[in-house]
Image (tube, rainbow, N blue to C red):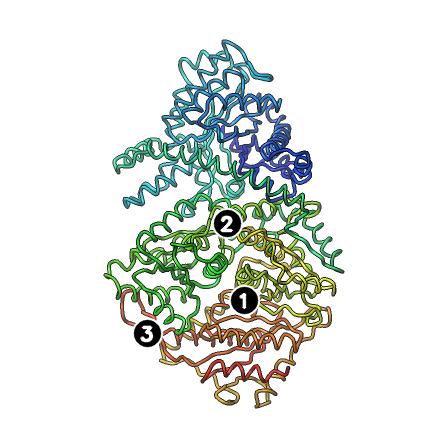
């Protein structure tokens, strides 16, 4: 018996807010019904993403398209088939409960929300066409919808009344239902298959979480926190009291005596929108008899894991009444708020319907043109990957990922079950868009023209990717990213940006990242010197987890805004959460488009989309990554269309930090020159991320395929498809982690590197100096540190690089070379390092990586120390020309540490961590011209 059965014993039925074809044909719906599920609701948004994101409907869609059907008729044909199929699955529930449950809901065309006459005729047509007794037609509770409800019930049509926010409107809906029953009792059903008065059914879908979203915003504006997160539940409890009042006494008893059923309240919008609230809040708090809760997949998964079972709906009624009275006393008119929610809801229902028709048209074109999002040519590895896909199906791995089964990766749940919030980001964050865009508009209205993001790793790489890929929309804030503790980088932005017109985004999940907080304190002081001190906080916004030290600090310093992210999302999986979306909004990106593309791919990657026979591209890519890594092809080389090039750095940190641990790893090779096939050894697998119409690398990728190298091709239609690509790679990385037998959500070596750096900083504060690294020899201002006995540059470097493990060809274990640049980020410096990288790549046929420190410590640094130990590391450091102090406290001048010291401590800690992990490191300290120093190393590598 499941918790769903337990809820039924408490009088509440669970319906599922989700539908798609493979969910039914795969047996997943039947399995959920067996566990107690009692009904299902649908909407155009759910259908839209399923149709656009998977192959479930391709065959039927192709046939309908070839027959010349327009998108609207194609949608109806596909939807009616699914709704009918779902109703057939629920028919036994309908029969066994005597028609109380077992219903499947279908929405009337949302564009008819203000047209009673056409709503009625359309609802009747759909009901008659489906010819099933357990169909409910969804009608919105608009002024035009309420008379339509009475007419439809009077005709014998089951009705699911949607978009209810107000207790007052609910009473009107219930009264319309009773009027309809009276008409039905008098006249009998008038539609084909219509029910009599003792069989017809209706639910009133009362929306919950959206009320808190709207009211909380109003409460925040007036500085009241006591009532936040409480009004939606109080409002729902008042609706339930109204339900009890309406469906007792006359005239209800007269209808009840004839077998009429009460119109049950259905709690809708029960997924938690605010991450600081419990993720099962709107299920736990609204359990009571004669109710339904239509629960979205993520919330149901959470409830089954840790939801509370108790009849809570009738508890705390006096408190709820007091809260509503207090809300009114604060000047917040709940009726006005709910009217606005209804208007927004109608518009929000229309947009997905319009998007659905666009998606169908686009899918038609793709199918007729034969375009695919994912292709793989794996040569001799086809069989091994095929076996891996069979394994995923046999073990139900994809469904288990969505069910938060930690055993997919490890026996213990630590840092797994609390790190899977990213699965739902594309859907959950849609509700956050209005608040994010309002904040961006507020910043623009305040005269902000620039934004500087202060962050590291996952907090900084997604915003940087968005800015570099999409550019800057006219009139929005020009975003820069500071993720280097090099004092030159800090001073550069201090000189470039006008603090009076700059918004500083302090972005850290933990709230305690030393680099991020150091940046914040430095720029807070800079802003305080440029504006009135009490205005400094208005130039700062925080993005962090609930309860972090940054949240408290932001409150103390009066930041303009604090965005609290879902704490169940790790930093590198946070691109489609507040960490990525707030900066994206500031540069003017269309967040709806970005999340819609992400949601499409999320639907593609769901458990019911079988990797064998289906087109689950996240599973397929993950199987390729994991399987080939185990067979020695563990250097995943990214080839990316130039307009999408910034995506490479983001996906590099995702893969490296997720898979490089427990002596295993997949090395993402990003930014390497695309060379001739013979340049590459047998440790490579290539991923070609291609933007439609871009042919830059087509010929070179084809040559790699013809030479027998395994290649995966991922096709993007436009820039916004990067939203889907983010999710695809997140899922693929999680799946690859399964095959490697590692936890892809922790980062043990990143933490150990931080510890080493903190120890060195503590030494500095105690002794006033850092430990000195004694060079092995010096040449022309270049201090070289190596364990080689050769005391000249060319010979020592040659000896070091020849330590590389050849690994066999194509056997595994082949070495790679990592260039670690603890230098001031600069285009000329980067170009010279790229030249060095390319020469090593071609000379030694080894994979190479290049990263600035300490930035890479929060990404590829995990793999450097946690993988199989095959890396050879060339670490570059330089003299600090001009340092910058780190204030001990924001708003205070006192400083006991500088950025130069912090960067040096991080470089020394990184080196020590590598050596303690038995890695090979060769150091180059550049005391003079940085470019000349790197060129000397370049010249020392034989061509």
Task: State the residue in front, 493 or 517.
Answer: 493
Q: Is the residue under label 1 in contact with that under label 3 (CB below 8 Å)?
A: no
Above or below, comparing residue 781 to residue 333 in the picture: below
Q: Nearer the viewer, mark 3 or mark 1?
A: 1
Q: Give the quarter of the image for residue 866.
A: bottom right
128 relative to 375 in the view: left or right: left
Task: State the residue in front, 267 or 519.
Answer: 519
Cα separation, mark 3 vs mark 2, equals 43 Å
Q: Which mark is residue 594?
A: 2
Quadrant of the image containing the C terminus: bottom right
Total numbered circles = 3
Q: Regarding mark 1 in the picture, which secondary structure is present there? A: helix
Image spot of residue 701 (x, y percent):
67, 62
For disc 1, the marked residue is 860
724 relative to 230 in the view: left or right: right
* Sequence order check, earlier mark of 2 and 1: 2
For disc 3, the marked residue is 896
């Amino acid at each position: 018996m499941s918790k769903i059965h337990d809820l039924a014993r408490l009088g509440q039925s669970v319906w599922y807010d989700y539908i798609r074809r493979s969910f039914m044909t795969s047996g997943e719906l039947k399995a959920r019904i067996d566990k107690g599920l009692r009904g299902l609701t649908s909407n155009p948004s759910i259908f839209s993403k399923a149709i656009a994101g998977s192959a479930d409907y391709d065959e039927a869609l192709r046939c309908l398209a070839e027959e010349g059907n327009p998108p609207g008729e194609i949608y109806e044909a596909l939807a009616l088939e699914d709704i009918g199929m779902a109703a057939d699955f629920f028919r036994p529930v309908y029969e066994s409960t005597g028609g109380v449950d077992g219903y499947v809901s279908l929405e009337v065309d949302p564009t008819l929300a203000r047209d009673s006459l056409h709503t009625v005729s359309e609802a009747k047509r759909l009901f008659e066409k489906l010819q099933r007794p357990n169909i409910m037609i969804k009608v919105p509770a608009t002024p035009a919808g309420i008379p339509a409800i009475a007419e439809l019930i009077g005709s014998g049509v089951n009705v699911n009344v949607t978009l209810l926010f107000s207790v007052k409107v609910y009473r009107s809906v219930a009264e319309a239902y009773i009027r309809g029953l009276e008409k039905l009792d008098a006249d009998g059903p008038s539609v084909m298959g219509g029910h009599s008065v003792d069989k017809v059914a209706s639910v009133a879908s009362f929306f919950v979480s959206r009320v808190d979203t709207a009211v909380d915003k109003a409460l925040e504006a007036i500085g009241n926190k006591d009532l936040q997160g409480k009004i939606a539940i109080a409002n729902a409890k008042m609706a339930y009291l109204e339900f009890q009042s309406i469906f007792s006494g006359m005239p209800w008893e007269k209808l009840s005596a004839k077998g009429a059923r009460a119109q049950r309240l259905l709690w809708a919008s029960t997924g938690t929108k605010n991450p600081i609230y419990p993720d099962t809040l709107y299920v736990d708090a609204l359990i009571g008899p004669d109710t339904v809760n239509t629960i979205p997949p993520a919330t149901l998964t959470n409830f089954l894991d840790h939801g509370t079972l108790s009849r809570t709906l009738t508890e705390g009624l006096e408190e709820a009444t007091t809260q509503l009275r207090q809300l009114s006393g604060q000047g917040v008119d709940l009726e006005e708020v709910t009217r606005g929610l209804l208007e927004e809801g109608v518009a929000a229902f229309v947009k997905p319907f319009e998007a659905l028709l666009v998606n169908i048209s686009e899918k038609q074109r793709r199918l007729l043109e034969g375009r695919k999002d994912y292709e793989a040519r794996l040569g001799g590895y086809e069989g091994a990957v095929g076996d891996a896909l069979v394994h995923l199906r046999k073990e139900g791995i994809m469904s288990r990922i969505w069910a938060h089964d930690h055993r997919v990766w490890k026996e213990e749940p630590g840092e797994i079950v609390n790190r899977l919030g990213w699965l739902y980001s594309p859907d959950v964050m849609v509700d956050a868009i209005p608040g994010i865009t309002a904040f961006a508009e507020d910043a623009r209205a305040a005269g902000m023209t620039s934004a500087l993001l202060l962050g590291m790793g996952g907090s900084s790489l997604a915003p940087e990717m968005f800015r570099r890929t999409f550019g800057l929309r006219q009139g929005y804030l020009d975003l820069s990213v500071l993720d280097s503790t090099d004092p030159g980088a800090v001073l550069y932005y201090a000189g470039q940006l006008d603090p009076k017109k700059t918004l500083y985004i302090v972005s850290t999940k933990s709230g305690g990242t030393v680099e991020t907080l150091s940046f914040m304190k430095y720029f807070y002081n800079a802003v305080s010197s440029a504006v009135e001190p009490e205005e400094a906080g208005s130039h700062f916004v925080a993005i962090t987890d609930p309860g972090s030290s940054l949240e408290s600090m932001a409150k103390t310093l009066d930041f303009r805004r604090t965005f609290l992210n879902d704490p169940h999302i790790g930093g590198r999986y946070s691109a489609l959460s507040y960490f990525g979306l707030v900066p994206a909004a500031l540069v003017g990106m269309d967040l709806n488009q970005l999340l819609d593309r992400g949601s499409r791919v999320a639907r593609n990657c769901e458990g019911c989309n079988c990797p064998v026979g289906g087109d689950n591209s996240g599973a397929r890519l993950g199987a390729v990554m994991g399987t080939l890594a185990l067979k020695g092809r563990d250097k995943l080389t990214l080839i990316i269309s130039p307009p999408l090039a910034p995506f490479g750095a983001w996906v590099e940190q995702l893969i490296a930090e997720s898979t490089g641990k427990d002596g295993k790893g997949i090395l993402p090779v990003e930014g390497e020159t695309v060379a001739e096939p013979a340049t590459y050894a047998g440790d490579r697998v290539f991923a070609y991320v291609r933007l439609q119409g871009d042919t830059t690398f087509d010929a070179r990728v084809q040559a790699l395929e013809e030479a027998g190298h395994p290649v995966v091709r991922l096709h993007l239609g436009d820039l916004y498809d990067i939203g889907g690509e983010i999710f695809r790679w997140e899922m693929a990385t999680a799946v690859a982690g399964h095959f490697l037998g590692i936890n892809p959500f922790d980062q043990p070596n990143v933490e150990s590197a931080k510890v080493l750096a903190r120890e060195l900083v503590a030494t500095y504060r105690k002794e006033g100096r850092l430990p000195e690294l004694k060079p092995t020899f010096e040449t022309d201002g270049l201090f070289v540190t190596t364990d080689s006995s050769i005391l000249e540059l060319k010979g020592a470097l040659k000896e070091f690089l020849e330590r590389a493990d050849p690994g066999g060809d194509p056997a595994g274990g082949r070495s790679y070379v990592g260039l670690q640049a603890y230098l001031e980020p600069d285009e000329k410096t980067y170009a010279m390092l790229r030249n060095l990288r390319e020469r090593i790549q071609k000379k030694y046929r080894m994979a190479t990586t290049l990263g600035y420190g300490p930035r890479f410590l929060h990404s590829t640094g995990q793999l450097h120390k946690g993988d199989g130990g095959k890396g050879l590391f060339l670490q570059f450091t330089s003299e600090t020309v001009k340092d910058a102090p780190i204030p001990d406290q924001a708003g205070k001048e006192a400083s006991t540490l500088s950025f130069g010291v912090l960067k040096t401590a991080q470089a020394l800690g990184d080196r020590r961590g590598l050596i303690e992990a038995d890695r090979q490191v060769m150091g180059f300290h550049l005391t003079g011209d940085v470019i000349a120093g790197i060129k000397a190393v370049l010249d020392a590598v034989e061509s």
